[in-house]
Image (cartoon, helix red, strand yellow):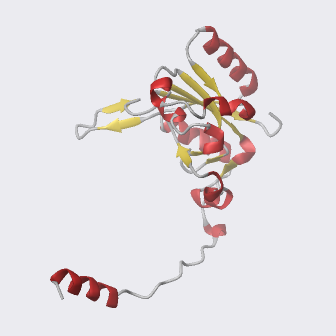
Amino acid sequence: MSSRELILKAVAENKPDLTALPEMDLSLTIRYANKIEQFIDKLKSAGATTCHQDSKLVLQNDLTEVKAQGKFIIDLLDIPHSKDWGDLHASQLESLDTCYLRAELGVAENGAMWISEKQMSNRLIPFICQHLVIVINEENIVNTMHEAYQRIETTADGFGVFIAGPSKTADIEQNLVIGAHGSRSLRVYLMGAVS
């Protein structure tokens, strides 16, 4: 028997017993007095801008203004039309200026927003655009990541991502660069339950 086989045999014979994950009492996790305020604070600390007051009107004005500039934008707020963008490749999306999409839920503890593949239509879109605009309903904001994972179905959509701000990177000298490998800005519009 070779050394390799001896080592692999020894490893196989000495595996620890499987241990079940502990049950977690979610009632003991963080609960914020004002989830919306906490969520907005975390988004701002991550470098995003937010709109909570008159957000529907401000969003409409934002869309109108960006469209008037004549830049390449993708509006995925109306999901039935999102299939138009599904087959585009990076070379076809390289000039994408602004993308508008909806988040399925947000997390107050860190400002992260869950966006599934069905929301983004094409996995490249939220990362290749220069400016990302996300719309989220207030009622879909949860306290913690524990609550978020209870509500999302990771196997249902094939792919999803938590986004919590514009792209950032920093080197050893602590120089922060915004937009190094993704969107340069993130604007978040919080809509009321009836928006």
Q: Position of residue 145 (x, y in %)?
A: 58, 56
Q: Nearer the viewer, residue 124 or 34?
A: 124
| Residue, far bottom | 13
| Residue, far left | 3
Quadrant (top left, top right, bottom left, bottom right) of the N terminus: bottom left
Q: Nearer the viewer, residue 13 or 103?
A: 13
Position of 51 with respect to 126 (left or right) is: right
Q: Determine the residue positioned at 53% across, 34% down.
A: 126
Position of 27 with respect to 185 (left or right) is: right
Quadrant (top left, top right, bottom left, bottom right) of the C terminus: top right
Q: Can residue 102 be seen in the rendering of this structure?
A: yes
Q: Determine the residue positioned at 33% across, 91% down.
A: 13
Q: Is residue 150 above or below residue 132?
A: below
Q: Determine the residue positioned at 59% across, 20% down.
A: 73
Q: Is residue 190 above or below residue 71?
A: below
Q: Position of residue 174 (x, y in %)?
A: 27, 37
Q: Position of residue 107 (x, y in %)?
A: 60, 49
Position of 53 with respect to 188 (left or right) is: right
Q: Can residue 130 be seen in the rendering of this structure?
A: no
Q: Position of residue 44 (x, y in %)?
A: 53, 35
Q: Is residue 179 above or below residue 40?
A: above
